[in-house]
């Protein structure tokens, strides 16, 4: 935000639907990012304020949806568990992030046109 108004900040949230059942969107992409940075499904879920069960269910759904798993995990124990993105997981996340950037850049003028049509007074009242 540059300080002018709430409407100066525009957020694009891209969601890809593959058929009726499979979706890849910002939440799953963020979860993958956090698993990569924390090395843990539990820590990634905590940062996103979701339960471990919910985070694990999303990982399982993504792993089943693609030809190869996106996340590889090991159970805890004395050495502790962990998780990492597989090569396929890294590729899917990179493609998704590049697509987000491409849509934001190519759609910037349309986004601005829509933003310019907003009723700014109703946003600040």
Image (cartoon, rainbow, N blue to C red):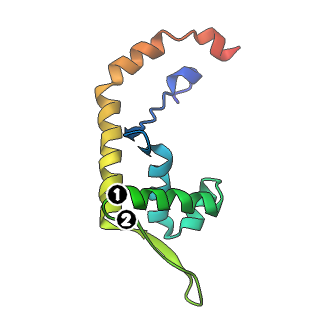
Q: In this view, does 73 lie above or below 88?
A: below
Horizontal and vertical percent position of residue 38:
51, 67
Horizontal and vertical percent position of residue 30:
48, 51
Q: Is residue 72 above or below residue 123?
A: below
Horizontal and vertical percent position of residue 2:
51, 28
Q: Residue at x 30, y 44 (%)?
A: 98
In the figure, residue 45 lies in which quadrant? Answer: bottom right
Q: Is residue 34 above or below residue 6?
A: below
Give the CA distance from mark 2 to mark 1: 6 Å
Badge 1: residue crowd in 10 Å (few <14, some 14–19, many ≥20):
few
Tag 1 residue: 66
Tag 2 residue: 69
Tag 2 near tag 1, CB within 8 Å: yes
Q: Residue at x 63, y 9 (%)?
A: 121
- In the image, farthest residue toward the bottom: 78
Horizontal and vertical percent position of residue 51:
66, 59
Q: Is residue 15 above or below residue 67?
A: above
Q: Which residue is drawn at 35% across and 24% down?
A: 108
The C terminus lies in which quarter of the figure?
top right
Which one is nearer the viewer's eye here, 43 or 1? Answer: 43
Which one is nearer the viewer's eye here, 28 or 47? Answer: 28
Q: Which residue is drawn at 49% across and 70% down?
A: 39
Q: Is residue 87 left or right of residue 16?
A: left
Local secondary structure at mark 1: loop
Local secondary structure at mark 2: loop
Which one is nearer the viewer's eye here, 1 or 84? Answer: 84
Which of the labelled discs sits on residue 20, or is there none?
A: none
């Amino acid at each position: 935000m540059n300080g002018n108004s709430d409407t100066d900040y525009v957020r694009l949230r891209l969601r890809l639907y593959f058929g009726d059942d499979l979706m890849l969107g910002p939440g799953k992409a963020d979860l993958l990012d956090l698993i990569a940075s924390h090395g843990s499904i539990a820590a990634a879920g905590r940062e996103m304020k979701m339960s471990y069960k919910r985070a694990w269910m999303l990982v399982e759904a993504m792993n089943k949806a693609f030809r190869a798993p996106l996340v590889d995990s090991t159970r805890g124990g004395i050495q502790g568990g962990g998780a990492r993105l597989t090569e396929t997981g890294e590729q899917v996340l990179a493609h998704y992030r590049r697509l987000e950037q491409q849509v934001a850049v190519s759609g910037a003028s349309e986004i601005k046109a829509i933003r310019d049509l907003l009723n700014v007074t109703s946003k600040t009242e």
